Image (cartoon, rainbow, N blue to C red):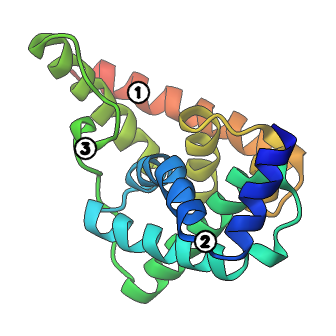
Amino acid sequence: MPDERGQYWQALKSEEHLAVEIMVDKYYPALLNFLLRLGCSRSDAEDIIQETFIKAIQNINHYRHQERFPAWLFKICHNNFKDFNKKASRRREIPHAPRDLPGSDGPSPESQAIMMDEALRVQAALNLLPPKQHLAVVLRFYHGFTFKEIAYLMSCPTGTVKSRLNHALTTLNQHLQEVDCNE
């Protein structure tokens, strides 16, 4: 396996099409899900992902830590997302229903409706969080990054990530309880 991994990275560094295709196939769904959860429209997310892969290929020689490749790629994607928002200067919208998220199949129409309602309530509460807390929650709970990887991606200490997550979860809990009380 080490030989295959080394060959893959060498191929990627030399921009061989098969290696690039493997990278896109492997990471595209996760990056799309990530951007949709941050409030991006599908078409904007696709543009940002395309730019992410281009930048990753252009800068692959600067990448040194193979075991953290997803965090490096997500950092490029997040930076592209921030640049896109600065240029567009649009207000954030509640993202599309969960059916737009890759891999979201419900067992029955009734269950799907309940899950969609829950997902929209959680997404609406997420959108009320400050951007850094929102990002930390999405990376940790939707993409499974470790505290260390999130700290790398967000360019901050691990303790700061833990603090942001703690504050975010407290705030989310309060928002969701308020919604439950109002219904």
Residue at image location 63% in from the left, 75% down from the top: 15
Q: What element carries label 1?
A: helix
Q: Give the residue number, with chain letter if any, for mark 1.
A: 176
Give 16 or 47, whichever is nearer the viewer: 16
Query: Which amino acid, mark 3?
Result: Asp
Q: Looking at the image, is 113 positioned above or below residue 20?
A: above
Tell me if residue 102 can be seen. Answer: yes
Give coordinates of residue 108: x percent, y percent. 14, 11
Q: Classify 10 Å Cα crowding around label 1: few (below 14), some (14-19), many (20 and above).
A: some
Q: Looking at the image, is 23 positioned above or below residue 85?
A: above
Q: What element carries label 3?
A: helix
Give 47 or 39, whichever is nearer the viewer: 47
Give coordinates of residue 142: x percent, y percent. 53, 36
Q: Give the residue number, with chain letter if any, for mark 3.
A: 100
Query: Which amino acid, mark 1?
Result: Leu
Q: In this view, does 84 lie to the left or right of 132?
A: left
Return the disc, 2 or 1, that comes first in the chain's sequence: 2
Q: Give the residue number, with chain letter if any, for mark 2.
A: 16
Give 113 or 126, whichever is nearer the viewer: 113
Q: Which of marks 2 and 1 is in front?
A: 2
Disc 2 from disc 1: Cα separation: 48 Å
Q: Looking at the image, is 52 positioned above or below residue 126?
A: below
Disc 2 from disc 3: Cα separation: 31 Å
Q: Looking at the image, is 69 positioned above or below residue 117?
A: below
